[in-house]
Image (cartoon, rainbow, N blue to C red):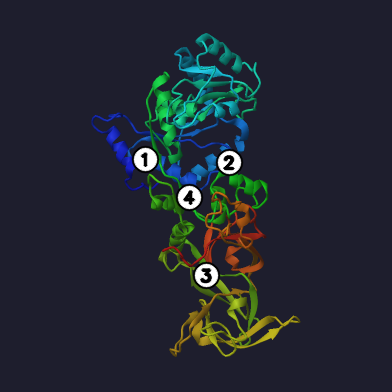
């Protein structure tokens, strides 16, 4: 992966591994801690890239560790999807794949150690009572079980593990500071009883550690030097450090927080994404309108364009909303250089060249990419009847309309100059056929006599055209910030976010196109072969991004 430019995290790491630093002489070691309860999205990519690039910049290592300490919505399906998406993104973790549940036994032992040290106790307050007794600013929290004898807490905790108590009836809490101004330090819950099947551990456990306990222990066991996480964990850092200092772990990682990056006109919350999927507002986690990597991949985004986006938005200490247009710009910039050009007609209208021989078909050479000479040329057939775009002809042309109307000339891309001579209407009064005559001296679109022809349009030969379905996507939401507090984000769903066009006409060379190929459809945008529905004989393309760059 390309290296992120220097940022405040890199500055901290340089200080830590430099002379006198807390990790002097040590190898930098970071980790990715995804939760297997959904599919990763573009915001996760930003977080992933920070840890991956920090490790690469300093010649270190980066682990992939699933945070599977909350079994309610964790599934193997999500594990497999996350692994696949992260590989696609460009990260190879080698043999450094771990699961938080791998450390359940060790975490339990360390929790027993905290009880033995008088730093943890079994509490019998209900979740509602814990909240009620939490106190307020200037008012300390209370717990009637805080002074429970060590031996009693040890016995109860072991019995909690053995499944002797109802779910929610008891917790293990840290004994820290009931008067702390940081409410996360007011004797936080470390373990809870939960009778839920675990996707890896099965029914072996009925007590599960809270993330605030499990995370620092896992980092320390794996000898992570820098635990990089988003800004909402800043207030949890004192608890992270408390766990490291008070448990018998082999290392002392440093937690550093960075600001999240969100994108406008979409939602990034797993909860909201899950609602979109489960309420059938979208076709699934891989719907191309979603910011999930599955959706972006299906739409036609490339790993390098997503990595470029993550680099461009930078690393900061505050949370920012980034324009979706920047993500589109990164893809457009790449595909403009690399994508093969082809001709596809989305809304077909027949053009008959009346002075072209009926039985003749010729082959033209058309360049594949004007930005890449090595891309060469392709053969395209040309005959008397062609498909053109419906909006490339007007009976009554508007001002500055340079396409086909009776008496006007246009270039057919890579072929000839034609002059419109007339049109035919169907029984509904719609234009069904446009007629024209071609100038045989203008092969390749040249004008030997120097006359000016302002318009150039694309076309497809009716004799060799292949049918395709084309899906044109727009923003999923009409409001740039649909998940703002106080709003029901589903009220802002864009009814025009997907337009499905059937019976589109494509060059014959596309009949064997396969995902993940991207193409520039001349004059129309960049399109990708759909990786789910497209197959031989049933071509399906998704518009990845329009030609016009709206990002400034």
Residue displayed at 74% across by 80% down: 428
Mark 3 and mark 1 in contact (Cβ < 8 Å)? no
| Residue topped by disc 2 | 38
Q: Earlier in the sequence, mark 3 or mark 2?
A: 2
| Residue topped by disc 4 | 262
Q: Earlier in the sequence, mark 2 or mark 4?
A: 2
Q: Is residue 510 above or below residue 88?
A: below
| Residue topped by disc 1 | 54
Separation of marks 1 and 3 at Cα, in angstroms: 40 Å
30 with respect to 194 (left or right): left
| Residue topped by disc 3 | 522
Q: Is residue 15 above or below residue 164?
A: below
Of helix, strand and loop, which one carries label 4?
strand
Asked if one can make out residue 159 in the rendered structure from this viewpoint, the answer is yes
Image quarter for residue 470? Answer: bottom right
Of helix, strand and loop, which one carries label 3?
loop
Of helix, strand and loop, which one carries label 1?
helix
Separation of marks 2 and 1 at Cα, in angstroms: 25 Å
Query: Mark 4, mark 3: which one is toward the viewer?
Result: 4
Please provide percent x and percent y for residue 456.
51, 79
């Amino acid at each position: 992966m390309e290296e992120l430019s220097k940022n405040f995290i890199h500055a901290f790491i340089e200080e830590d591994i430099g002379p006198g630093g807390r990790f002097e002489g040590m190898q930098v070691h970071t980790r990715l801690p995804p939760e297997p309860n959904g599919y990763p999205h573009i915001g996760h990519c930003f977080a992933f890239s920070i840890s991956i690039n920090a490790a690469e910049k300093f010649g270190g290592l980066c682990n992939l560790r699933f945070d599977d300490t909350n079994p309610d919505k964790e599934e193997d399906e999500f594990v497999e999807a996350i692994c696949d998406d992260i590989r696609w993104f460009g990260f190879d973790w080698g043999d450094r794949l771990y699961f938080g549940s791998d450390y359940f036994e060790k975490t339990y032992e360390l929790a027993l150690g905290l009880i033995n040290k008088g730093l943890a106790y079994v509490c019998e307050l209900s979740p509602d009572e814990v909240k009620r007794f939490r106190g307020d600013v200037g008012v300390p929290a209370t717990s009637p079980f805080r002074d429970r004898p060590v031996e009693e807490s040890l016995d109860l905790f072991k019995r909690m593990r053995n499944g002797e108590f109802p779910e929610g009836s008891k917790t293990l809490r840290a004994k820290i500071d009931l008067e702390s101004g940081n409410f996360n330090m007011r004797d936080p819950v470390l373990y809870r009883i939960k009778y839920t099947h675990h996707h890896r551990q099965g029914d072996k456990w009925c007590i599960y550690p809270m993330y605030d306990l499990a995370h620092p222990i896992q980092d320390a066991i794996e000898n992570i030097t820098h635990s990089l996480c988003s800004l909402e964990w800043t207030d949890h850092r004192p608890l992270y450090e408390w766990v490291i200092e008070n448990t018998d772990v082999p290392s002392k990682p440093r937690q550093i927080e960075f600001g999240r990056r969100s994108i406008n006109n979409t939602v990034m919350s797993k909860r909201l994404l899950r609602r979109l999927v489960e309420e059938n507002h979208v076709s699934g986690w891989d719907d191309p309108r979603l910011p999930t990597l599955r959706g972006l991949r299906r739409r036609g985004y490339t790993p390098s364009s997503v990595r470029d986006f993550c680099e461009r938005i930078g690393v900061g200490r505050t949370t920012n909303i980034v324009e979706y247009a920047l993500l589109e710009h990164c893809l457009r910039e790449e595909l403009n250089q690399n994508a093969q050009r082809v001709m596809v007609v989305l809304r077909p209208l027949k053009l008959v060249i009346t002075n072209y021989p009926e039985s003749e078909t010729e082959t033209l050479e058309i360049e594949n990419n004007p930005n890449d000479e090595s891309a060469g040329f392709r053969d395209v057939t040309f005959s008397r009847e062609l498909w053109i775009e419906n909006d490339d002809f007007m009976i009554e042309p508007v001002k500055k309309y340079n396409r086909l109307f009776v008496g006007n000339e246009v270039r057919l891309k890579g072929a000839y100059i034609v002059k419109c001579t007339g049109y035919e209407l169907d029984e509904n009064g719609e234009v069904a056929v446009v007629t024209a005559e071609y100038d045989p001296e203008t092969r390749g679109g040249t004008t030997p006599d120097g006359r000016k022809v302002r318009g150039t349009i694309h076309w497809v030969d009716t004799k060799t055209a292949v049918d395709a379905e084309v899906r044109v996507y727009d923003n999923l939401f009409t409001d740039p910030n649909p998940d703002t507090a106080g709003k029901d984000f589903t009220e802002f769903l864009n009814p025009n976010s997907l337009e499905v066009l059937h019976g589109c006409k494509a060059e014959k060379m596309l009949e064997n196109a396969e995902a993940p190929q991207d193409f520039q459809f001349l004059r129309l945008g960049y399109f990708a072969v759909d990786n789910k529905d497209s197959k031989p004989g049933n071509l399906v393309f998704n518009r990845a991004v329009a030609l016009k760059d709206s990002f400034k």
